């Protein structure tokens, strides 16, 4: 089989790195096998063929049984030619079809004798794996960029970006696509999905099926999602270091592996794609909208009292969300929509009845062509939604009180090819905010049914300001709200102050604070309202990667306007290790709903008695009274918390 790493096949097919005892080659490219007969081969008299089979019931008509002949007079869909003869040994060059089925084949030699065709017995040592080939121009996954091929097919160690838009964090991940057993595990995923063998040469079908199989929802796929903070019966998502353990565990136990969050889904999916030869990379979208109802709006609904209506607010904005891009042609779409495609294994919404997403053309998303399969409209909303605050009256009618058109899809990152730095690919998904092209794209998306909020609510005449606070995690603190009356008349404001623990997915875990003071402000005057926050109220509710979100809204009685304010600010977190031992593996997170996206800082060590200070500048993203929250978490110390209240003006 000429399967050793130092032999010609694996070297020419870029498969030397696969830790496999078998021959691993890529389709659409010649490989060689040596056949030894019991006497010298006589081309004029002897007739033989090399036969390849895949699946449980090989058939020539389905492309699962392929005979390869050594003479040019007789050829099949795979080409064969004799490249060398030496005594009893014939070297046969075999070129598979560039669209052939990807998977594990078995090889047989068939010889025509006076007594009929005689075949070799099945021998597992003569099995071989045929993969997608991004080096072959005729392959649907052909990527004509060697630097990108090295990064998106061959690179094993990657960086996944998380944290927050203005505090980007990095997580190293070992994709391990060449590790022993990983290739078999990836093929098992397709077997487990009952994917027809005949579909396994089409990267569109393979990636769509895999996006469903990488999560365990509705098909007992690879990973179980868990955002609760309780990982008692599995491994915490933040504890994984690579994909190998996950894939091998799934293949051996035949059971979904616990637990994953979005970056784990994306990382393991990346391994699957690269292992099979499909160019792939992990992408992070900061302020990623989860549009629950298929429009182009992230709807935040406030009740008649100014409080967020949790039952009716179904949309959410993730501080960050990770998905994958894979590279392929799209013959099912018009010219120009091939190339990078979004696929996402994180179970958010169903697509054609299953939790999956993609492949969706990045070019289609950028140009508002949301009608194209698959799931382009959902991905378009993830990077383009408007954030709309509605006031819901008692009679059920809703009035928009604040629209933010620039908050979602703030930045989209991936690892730079050949370097351990990040690459900003936001411009591949969207035109610059406010540009003529962007308006044209949004209009195009609206033609295909995406709804936008066209109103522009007027500004109220009372501003709400929150000063920067420095808080020790776990301490009680005061939230000082300053109401500023810009009008020439007295104003009475009914304020609503809410404090919640919020997951990085934007979903509220629990509300620990609610106040509804009434504030009277003289003309051109300001009034401060102080709220005492006791740590006992929020510490016990903390969850992993959570933040404290403070939302402050206000209704001016004289004008009945909701007041939501935006203002550029600075937040500083200071922490002192009070123990007589060092803290290791410390994560500090900070965010504020509508103010600051979730931000991460990681400290490998905080010595005993030492302090750290972390300052962040941020631009509030939506109007409202809210808070900046900070948390500290490490194996030895958790549920350390601090917060500061702010009011944001338009």
Image: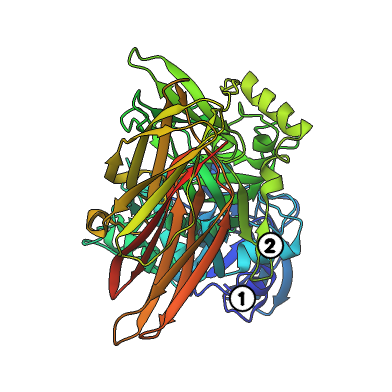
- Left or right: 419 with respect to 301? right
- Is residue 198 at all visible to an observer of this figure? no
The percent coordinates of residue 623 (x first, y second) are: 51, 37
The percent coordinates of residue 282 (x first, y second) are: 56, 56
**What residue is shown at x 57% (from left), y 41% (from top)?**
407
**What residue is shown at x 47% (from left), y 27% (from top)?**
490
- Asked if residue 637 is positioned above or below residue 132 in the image, the reply reads below
- Asked if residue 448 is positioned above or below residue 649 in the image, the reply reads above
Colouring? rainbow
Q: What residue is shown with label 1?
A: 39
Front residue of this view, candidates 238 and 180:
238
Q: Earlier in the sequence, mark 1 or mark 2?
A: 1
- Asked if residue 565 is positioned above or below residue 446 in the image, the reply reads below
Query: What is the residue that sits farthest to the top in this orientation?
Result: 395
Helix, strand or loop status at disc 2: helix
Helix, strand or loop status at disc 1: loop
Mark 1: give few (<14), some (14-19) or many (20+) Cα within 10 Å: few
Front residue of this view, candidates 424 and 92:
424
Front residue of this view, candidates 298 and 142:
298
Q: What residue is shown with label 2?
A: 149
What distance separates the C-alpha of mark 1 from that of mark 2? 44 Å
The percent coordinates of residue 344 (x first, y second) are: 49, 46
**Which mark is nearer the camera, 1 or 2?**
2
Mark 2: give few (<14), some (14-19) or many (20+) Cα within 10 Å: many
- Left or right: 475 with respect to 19? left
- Left or right: 235 with respect to 140? left
Q: In which quarter of the image is residue 52?
A: bottom right
The percent coordinates of residue 521 (x first, y second) are: 45, 33
**Quarter of the image containing the C terminus?**
top right
Q: Which numbered marker is on residue 253?
A: none
């Amino acid at each position: 089989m000429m399967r050793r790493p130092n032999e010609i096949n694996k070297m020419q097919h870029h498969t030397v790195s696969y830790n496999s005892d078998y021959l691993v080659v890529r389709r659409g490219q010649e490989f060689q096998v040596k056949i030894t007969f019991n006497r010298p081969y006589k081309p004029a008299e002897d007739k033989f063929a090399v036969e390849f089979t895949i699946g449980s019931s090989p058939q020539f008509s389905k492309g699962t049984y392929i005979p390869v002949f050594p003479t040019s007079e007789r050829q099949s869909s795979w080409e064969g030619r004799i490249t060398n003869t030496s005594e009893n040994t014939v070297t046969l060059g075999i070129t598979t079809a560039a669209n052939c089925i990807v998977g594990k084949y078995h090889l047989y030699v068939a010889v025509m004798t006076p007594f009929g065709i005689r075949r070799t017995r099945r021998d597992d040592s003569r099995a071989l794996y045929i993969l997608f080939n991004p080096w072959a121009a005729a392959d649907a996954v052909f990527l004509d960029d060697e630097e990108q091929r090295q990064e998106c097919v061959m690179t094993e160690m990657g960086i996944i970006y998380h944290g927050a838009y203005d505090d980007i964090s990095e997580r190293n991940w070992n994709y391990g696509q060449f590790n022993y057993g990983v290739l078999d595990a990836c093929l098992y995923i397709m077997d487990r999905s009952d994917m027809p063998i005949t579909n396994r040469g089409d990267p569109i079908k393979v990636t769509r099926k895999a996006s469903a199989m990488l999560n365990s929802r509705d098909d007992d796929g690879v990973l179980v999602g868990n955002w609760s903070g309780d990982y008692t019966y599995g491994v915490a998502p933040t504890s994984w270091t690579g994909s190998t353990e996950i894939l091998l565990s799934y293949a051996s136990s035949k059971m979904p592996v616990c637990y994953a969050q979005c970056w784990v889904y994306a990382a393991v999916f990346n391994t699957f794609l690269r292992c099979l030869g499909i160019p792939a990379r992990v992408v992070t979208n900061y302020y990623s909208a989860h549009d629950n109802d298929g429009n182009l709006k992230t709807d935040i609904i406030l009740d008649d009292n100014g409080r967020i209506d949790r039952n009716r607010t179904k949309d959410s904005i993730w501080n960050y969300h990770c998905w994958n891009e894979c590279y392929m042609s799209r013959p099912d779409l018009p010219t120009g929509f091939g190339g990078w495609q979004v696929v996402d294994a994180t179970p958010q919404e169903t697509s054609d009845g299953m939790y999956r997403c993609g492949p969706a053309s990045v070019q289609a998303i950028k140009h508002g062509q949301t009608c194209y399969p698959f799931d382009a409209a959902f991905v378009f909303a993830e990077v383009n939604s408007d954030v709309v605050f509605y006031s819901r009256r008692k009679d059920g009618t809703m009035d928009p009180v604040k629209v933010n058109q620039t908050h979602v899809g703030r930045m989209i990152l991936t690892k730079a090819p050949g370097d351990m730095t990040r690459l900003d690919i936001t411009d591949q998904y969207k035109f610059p905010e406010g540009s003529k092209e962007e308006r044209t794209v949004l209009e195009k998306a609206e033609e295909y049914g995406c709804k936008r909020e066209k109103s522009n609510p007027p500004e109220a005449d009372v501003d709400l300001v929150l000063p920067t606070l420095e808080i020790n995690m776990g301490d009680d603190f005061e939230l000082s709200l300053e109401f500023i009356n810009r009008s020439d008349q007295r104003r009475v404001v009914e304020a609503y102050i809410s404090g919640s623990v919020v997951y990085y997915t934007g979903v509220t875990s629990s509300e620990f604070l609610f106040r509804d003071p009434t504030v009277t402000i003289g003309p051109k005057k300001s009034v401060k309202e102080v709220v005492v926050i006791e740590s006992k109220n929020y510490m016990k509710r903390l969850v992993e990667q959570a933040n404290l979100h403070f939302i402050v809204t206000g209704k001016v009685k004289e004008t009945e306007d909701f007041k939501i304010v935006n203002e550029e600010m600075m937040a500083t977190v200071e922490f002192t290790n009070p123990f007589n031992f060092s803290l290791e593996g410390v994560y500090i997170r900070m965010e504020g709903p509508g103010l600051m996206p979730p931000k991460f800082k990681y400290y490998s060590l905080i010595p005993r008695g030492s302090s750290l200070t972390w300052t962040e500048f941020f631009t509030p993203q939506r109007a409202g009274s809210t808070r900046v929250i900070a948390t500290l978490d490490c194996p030895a110390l958790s549920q350390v918390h601090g917060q500061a209240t702010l009011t944001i003006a338009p």
